[in-house]
Image (spheres, helix red, strand yellow):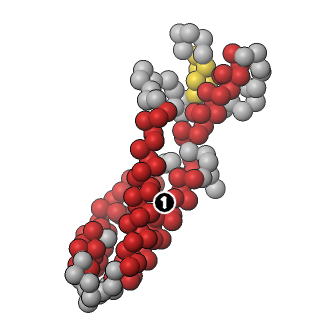
């Protein structure tokens, strides 16, 4: 199963509605120390981080498809004819360059270094997830950890 199969408006809408309805109950459950232990929340945070890390590591997202197409365009400009990897749905803009309907061309594209912010974000999440296991239920910071978890 590829990630593109999950990109359906009905599935996305259903997921959003479900999340909207379930979130208040989950928050209430997480804040009540009688219903959920701190260690359960700690493990839920760790599992969530692992799932997120794996999800962004899987190739096949839309930005990956656009990157493949741009690489093929660069190869064409260098005299290489590697068009087998392009999708069937292509168009040409005014300059004659082909682009797919997936991503197309934009007027403004951020520089590659602009995405370097994700390194500190993932590092901060990793520090939070790993350091929370040093907190016991009796620590004074446990209620705060329960709230932000």
Q: Nearer the viewer, residue 120 or 49?
A: 120
| Residue drawn at x 48%, y 60% as measured from the top left | 52
For mark 1, what is the residue? 52
Measuring from the top left, give residue 115's x and y in whole percent: 45, 39
Element on which disc 1 rests = helix
Q: Nearer the viewer, residue 25 or 73?
A: 73
Q: Is the residue marked by circle 1 packed among few (<14), some (14-19), or many (20+) residues within 10 Å?
A: few
Residue 117, quarter of the rendered image: top left
Q: Nearer the viewer, residue 148 or 10?
A: 148
Residue 126, quarter of the rendered image: bottom left
| Residue drawn at x 51%, y 64% as measured from the top left | 51
Is residue 84 shown left or right of residue 33?
right
Residue 114, quarter of the rendered image: top left
Is residue 25 visible to the viewer in this orientation of the structure? no
| Residue drawn at x 30%, y 86% as measured from the top left | 137
Is residue 68 shown left or right of residue 46?
right
Is residue 49 visible to the viewer in this orientation of the structure? yes
Q: Nearer the viewer, residue 94 or 148?
A: 148
Location of residue 54 with respect to 37 vertically, above or below? above
Location of residue 127 with respect to 135 vertically, above or below? above
């Amino acid at each position: 199963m590829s990630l593109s199969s999950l990109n359906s408006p009905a599935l996305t809408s259903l997921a959003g509605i479900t999340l909207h309805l379930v979130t208040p109950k989950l928050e209430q459950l997480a804040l009540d120390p009688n219903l959920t232990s701190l260690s359960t929340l700690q493990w839920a945070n760790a599992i969530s981080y692992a799932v997120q890390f794996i999800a962004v590591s899987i190739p096949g997202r839309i930005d990956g498809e656009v990157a493949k197409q741009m690489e093929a365009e660069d190869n064409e400009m260098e005299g290489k004819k590697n068009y087998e990897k392009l999708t069937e749905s292509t168009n040409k803009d005014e300059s004659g360059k082909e682009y797919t309907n997936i991503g197309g061309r934009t007027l403004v594209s951020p520089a590659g270094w602009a995405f370097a912010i994700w390194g500190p974000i993932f590092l901060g999440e990793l520090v939070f997830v790993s350091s929370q296991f040093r907190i016991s239920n009796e620590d004074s910071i446990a209620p705060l950890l329960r709230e932000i978890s």
